[in-house]
Image (spheres, grey):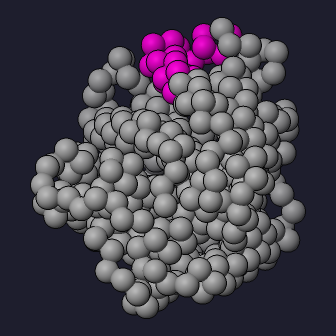
Amino acid sequence: MQYKSQAVAKPYFIAAIGLFIGQIIFGLIMGMQYVVGDFLFPEIPFNVARMVHTNLLIVWLLFGFMGAAYYMVPEESETELYSPKLAIALFWVFLAAGALTILGYLFVPYATLAQMTGNDLLATMGREFLEQPLPTKLGIVVVALAFLFNITMTVLKGRKTAISTVLLLGLWGLAIFFLFSFYNPHNLVKDKYYWWWVVHLWVEGVWELILGALLAFVLIKVTGVDREVIEKWLYVIITLTLVTGIIGTGHHYYWIGAPDYWQWWGSIFSALEPIPFFAMTVFAFNMVNRRRREHPNKAAVLWALGTGVMAFLGAGVWGFLHTLAPVNYYTHGSQITAAHGHMAFYGAYVMVVLTLISYAMPILRGRAANSNKAQVFEMWSFWLMTVAMVFITLFLTAAGILQVWLQRVSDTPMSFMATQDQVALFYWMREWAGVMFFIGLVVYVISFFIKGETRAVTQ
C-alpha cells in the first residue's frame, strides 16, 4: 500500500542525484590536478576541490538517507508521515545551507570564510571532512533534530518493526555523534581522538545500521521472503557491526599518541569488521534465492545484490588489507587508504541509496517499475559505475603499494614528491576510470527519462 506522504521523498532523491553529479565532477577535477598540477589553478585550488568533493559526498548521502527514511517509515509504520510540511520545509533549508556552504568554499578564501562565520567564537573549522562553517554545522543539527522528530513521531504513532527501529537507532546515532564536530581541543592527540568519534563511528558504526535497514526493506519488497527471516538476519548483522565497529575505532589511534594498547584492540576488532559485511552479502543473495515472487524491478534487485558484494570488498577486504597495526605502520595515509575509502563508500552507502532510489522512484511516479528499456539502461549504469570503481580501487592500490615501497620501505627512501612522479601512471589510469564512472552516472540519470511500457503499481 502506498501512502500520500511518501511523496516527500521525491525531492530528496532528486537533490541527492544532483549533488552526486557535482561530487563526481569535482573528483575528476582533483584527479586531473594529481597529474597536471596547475589544472584550473588558481580558480579551484586542490584543497578547495577536495573540500567540495568530500562535503558533497556527505551531504548527498544525507539527502539520500532522509529521503529513504521518509519513503520507508510510513510504509513500515502503516501510517502517514507525522508532518509532510515539515519534511518539505527541512528539504529547502538543508539544500540552501548546503549550496551556500559549497559556494563559500569556491568563492571565498577559507581563512576569510572562517572569520565571516564566527569561527573565532567557537573554532570548529579546518578539520578534514568537518570543514563546514559554524552556521552550517548548527544548521545540520537543527535539520537533523527536526527530521528525527518527524520520523520518530511517525514510528511512535504506527506499527513498530525491527527495520524501522534499526533505522531510527542509526539515524539518532548519526545526529548524536555529529555533535563531536563542535569539540575541537587544542591538544592535537585529543582532537584526533574525538574527531574519529564523528568520522569512524559514522561510517563504520551507525551508518551501517542505516545500510542494514534500507537493504532489509528493499529485500522484503522485491523478494516476498517472510519478514521474520529477514529481521533475524538484520539483528545478527547490526550486533556484529556495533561490536566490531565501536571497538574497531582503535585502528585510527595507532600513531596519534594514544596508549599503545589500542594497537591490540584496534587490530583484533578491525580484523573482525569484514564479518558483518560478509554476512550482509550472504543475506542479500540468500533472500533473493529464496524469493517467492519475481519483482518487475530487476534493476533494484541488481543494486541490492551489488551493495552486499561491493560493501564486503571495499569496507571488508580492502579495509582488512591495511588495518593490522604492523601493516598500517607502513601504509597509513597512503593511496591504499584512498583505495579503501573509495570502494567502501561506493559499496556500502552510494549503492544502497541508489538501491532505494531505483526501487522507490518508479512507485512515486505511479508504476511498479521502470520500462524494460529504461531498466536495461539502468543496469548498464550499474555495471559501468561498479566496474569503474573496481578499476579506481585497483589503480589506487597499485599506486599505494609502490608509494609505500619507494617512500617508506626502501633502503634509500625517496621524497614524497619524487615518489608521486613515479606513480603518476596509476593516477592517469585512475582518472580514465573516473571518466568511465561519470559516464555510468549520466546513463543512470538518463534511464529515468526513457519511456516505454510500464506496469501500474499493484501493491
The relative height of residue 31 versus residue 143 in the rendered view (above or below) is below
Q: Is residue 385 above or below residue 428?
A: below
Residue 275's quadrant in the figure?
A: bottom right
Residue that appears at 82% across and 36% down = 183
Q: Is residue 189 left or right of residue 327?
A: right
* Residue segment shown in magenta: 95-115
50 vs 348, nearest the viewer = 348
Task: State the image coordinates of residue 166 (x, y, percent, origin top left).
Answer: 70, 65
Q: Residue at x 46, y 32 (%)?
A: 52
Q: Which image quadrant for residue 355?
A: bottom left
Locate residue 196, reporting x and y percent.
72, 51
Residue 304: in magenta span:
no
The x and y percentages for residue 111 are: 61, 15
Q: Residue at x 69, y 69 (%)?
A: 161
Q: Vertically, is 250 above or below 68?
A: below
User: Which residue occupies 79% across, 41% down?
Assistant: 180
* Main secondary structure along the magenta-highlighted residues: helix
Front in this rendered view, residue 2 or 381: 2
